[in-house]
Image: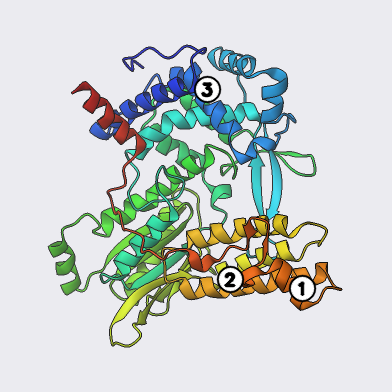
Amino acid sequence: MNTGAPPPTPARSIEEAEAWVLGIQAKLHRWATDDPARRFGDLFNLVHDPAFLLVGWRRVRGNKGARSAGVDGETAYYVERVRGEEVFLAELRASLKDRSFRPLPVRERLIPKPGTTTTKWRRLGIATVRDRVVQAALKLVLEPIWEADFQPCSYGFRPRRRAQDAIAEIHHLASHGYEWVLEGDITACFDEIDHTALMTRVRQRIADKRVLALVKAFLKAGILTEDGAVRDTVTGTPQGGILSPLLSNLALSVLDDHIVEHGQARAPSWVRQRRRHQGLANYRIVRYADDFVVLVAGTRQHTQALREQVAWVLATVGLRLSAEKTTICHIDEGFDFLGWRIQRHQQRGSQRRYVYTYPSRKALAAVKAKVRAVTGQTTNQSLGLMLLRLNWVLRGWAYYFRHGASSKTFAYLDAFAWRRVCRWLCRKHPRTGWRRLHRRWLPGWRPTEGKVTLFDPGTIAIRRYRYRGTRIPLPWQQATMTTQGSAG
């Protein structure tokens, strides 16, 4: 593909490589946006380009999963220290160019699902480092193209979008007449995506047969189970792979497209009002990865009928709605989504009713369990070290929930953590009286050692998250504007 600029040489810095890759991504995104029917060919040369492989390698090395090895037993540290970065990337590029590259099976690891007992497990697939680098390079090429087609109602695993955007859109829609909620749950989404349907959607934009073969090879790579057996992957994408979130978003975009087309999301307000006067429903979807809610401006009967539509659309890509976990409720009853409780209440001191978002009981129970784990461990560590670990948990949780009605929850969590730390101190110093404990480790009634003090979630300012709607810029759009501004 003629991108109009020579690639940087392998000897150049990572900054130059990232700048060049960003420029190519901006062009791909612009071409995909200008021509929605365009199919891209000759993309394979970008996949094995030295700059794309270098940027992909740096992202793999900087990820937390760099410490995990695939079936070949090699970690990113081993590749960097023993084999050498340049030698590794040169060998990988040569295998891609001569078409000898073959993905290895992913190493399966079972982890308990959060908030459940150990009887329910989540399957993670750990790919080899070389496969992860190729997947990262492949994602760098494909993501700008598919992002031109993705709907703005999808927020999970997309650049510069976050869970707060999804919650803000739900709050906005529920405050403007969308009062019935279909809370959907997909059964084993990553495990049951139909490969034929997925590759059909890939071919709608990608014409390069080498790229298509590479994507299919990753889908069919197989899984090395924990008992040592190799299992073929007939359906699904390995959860935990770099390319899997992008492919799952591509498969689930069929649901986004259906709801946007038939739910009057893009229709003018007078069209939606006329439909309501005619007894018809309007509906919108908000999706974060495989978690989604459909908000309906209509009746419960409309929502129940919509549930059958959603099940039919998901069946086209091999997915199923969970009959037990897919529920229908009114906004006054409330529902949980992405750790938040979203419900309409009467405002205290008035007759007005508003939609409120605040931490759910499940999310609060989860962070309390983490606090118990940190403060319930051995006392054979300093107070300062324990506070550092505890502050990391409290600060991250509080910053996530600072955009809702969370002040009372923060105060409760602070009191809970304070009590746990005090009990830990009493266990660590069983022969020390309370006055001495207070004088030495609780100055100002805050557990402190040296410069480390127990973090108070209540010090986090509560601010309503600004609803950005369709105005969320993509990195490639900004790169295009910067290039045009420099040219001008």
**Type of residue at label 3?**
Leu
Residue 246 horizontal/vertical position (percent): 47, 40
Dot 2, how many residues are within 10 Å of its Cα: few (below 14), some (14-19), or many (20+)? some
Is disc 3 placed on a helix, strand or loop? helix
Q: Which residue has dot 3 on it?
A: 53
Question: Nearer the viewer's eye, disc 2 or disc 1?
Answer: 1
Instruction: Judge left or right: residue 63 versus residue 293.
Output: right
Point 34% across, 53% down: residue: 153
Q: Which residue has dot 1 on it?
A: 436
Q: Quadrant of residue 418?
A: bottom right
Residue 234 horizontal/vertical position (percent): 60, 41
Specify the label residue 80 is tagged with: none
Point 30% across, 35% down: residue: 478
Instruction: Judge left or right: residue 79 versus residue 402.
Output: right
Dot 3, how many residues are within 10 Å of its Cα: few (below 14), some (14-19), or many (20+)? many
Disc nearer the start of the sequence (3/1): 3
Residue 177 horizontal/vertical position (percent): 26, 72
Question: Nearer the viewer's eye, disc 3 or disc 2?
Answer: 2
**Type of residue at label 1?**
Arg
Q: Are marks 3 and 2 in contact (CB under 8 Å)?
A: no
Residue 47 horizontal/vertical position (percent): 48, 22
Q: Which residue has dot 2 on it?
A: 414
Task: Give the alpha-carbon distance from disc 3 to disc 2, as whole Å.
Answer: 46 Å
Point 47% across, 25% down: residue: 211
**Type of residue at label 2?**
Asp
Instruction: Judge left or right: residue 198 versus residue 376.
Output: left
Is 132 rendered above or below residue 305?
above
Is 250 rendered above or below residue 31?
below
Q: Is residue 440 visible?
A: yes
Is disc 1 placed on a helix, strand or loop? helix
